[in-house]
Amino acid sequence: MFAALSLMAAAIYGCATKTQTGTLAGAGVGALVGQAIGRNTAGTLIGAGVGAGAGYLIGSESDKEAATKQKAQGQPAETGAFGGTKWKAVSMKHAPTILYETYIIEFSPDGWLTTNETFADGTKKTDKEHYRIAGDTLIINNPGYLINAKYVLEDKRLKVMLDDYQAEFMRLN
């Protein structure tokens, strides 16, 4: 039991966002409660699932509040190495498949991400979202949603990974 709690504490310490920490902590606490109540594997798994969901929601809201507070206080955004850079997608794999002519993202130093999409049929779309960097996680949010995507930055290549979405970008500036 002590070993499991120590492992969980070490994993939580390594989380980059409160969403990740909340999910992991919720799963651990939920598993312990589920085992105590059910005294079987099913109870443990159900507890872990419910705890992970609750922890995710609490952590996500905490991440959103932190970003809002940071902006309201006029603090500089946590833009890491991305502030002032522009990238063009060279490969994208996600469901459903969308055919892009070009897909360009631009990270401003003030924490705004602008996405310019040109579709195969010639139509264009531009979106602006808040972003920040926490460890190896790119956090994108606006009212109503929060995205925590892992990224790898290698010279002039950026790889972004999230569940069923993977993209590789080439740096333009």
Image: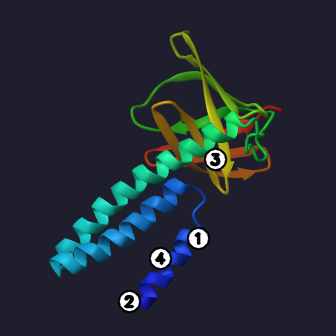
* Mark 4 crowd level (few <14, some 14–19, many ≥20, 10 Å Cα): some
Q: Which residue is mark 3?
A: 159
Which circle's residue, 1 or 2, is located before the other in the chain? 2
Callout 4 touching callout 1 (CB < 8 Å): no
Vertical position of residue 71 compared to residue 6: above or below = above
Q: From mark 3 to mark 4, how far is it between C-alphas?
A: 28 Å
In screen coordinates, is 154 left or right of 136? right
Q: Amino acid at mark 2?
A: Met
Sequence order check, earlier mark of 4 and 1: 4
- Dot 3: within a 10 Å radius of its alpha carbon, few (fewer than 14), some, or many (20 or more) residues? some
Name the mark on residue 1. 2
Residue 80 placed where, x, y %?
A: 76, 47
Residue at coordinates 44% horizontally, 49% vertically from top-left? 163
Q: Earlier in the sequence, mark 3 or mark 4?
A: 4
Q: Can residue 147 be seen in this snapshot?
A: yes
- Disc 3 from disc 1: Cα separation: 24 Å
The amino acid type found where label 1 is placed reads Tyr
Residue under pointer 1 = 13
Q: Residue at x 72, y 37 (%)?
A: 73
Measured in 3D between alpha carbons, the distance from the residue under mark 4 to the one under mark 1, in whole angstroms, is 9 Å
Judge left or right: residue 158 versus residue 22: right
Report how far apart the C-alphas of labels 2 and 3 lie in the structure.
38 Å
Element marked by disc 3 = strand
Q: Quadrant of the N terminus?
A: bottom left
Say the numbered circle drawn on residue 8: 4
Three-letter code, disc 4: Met
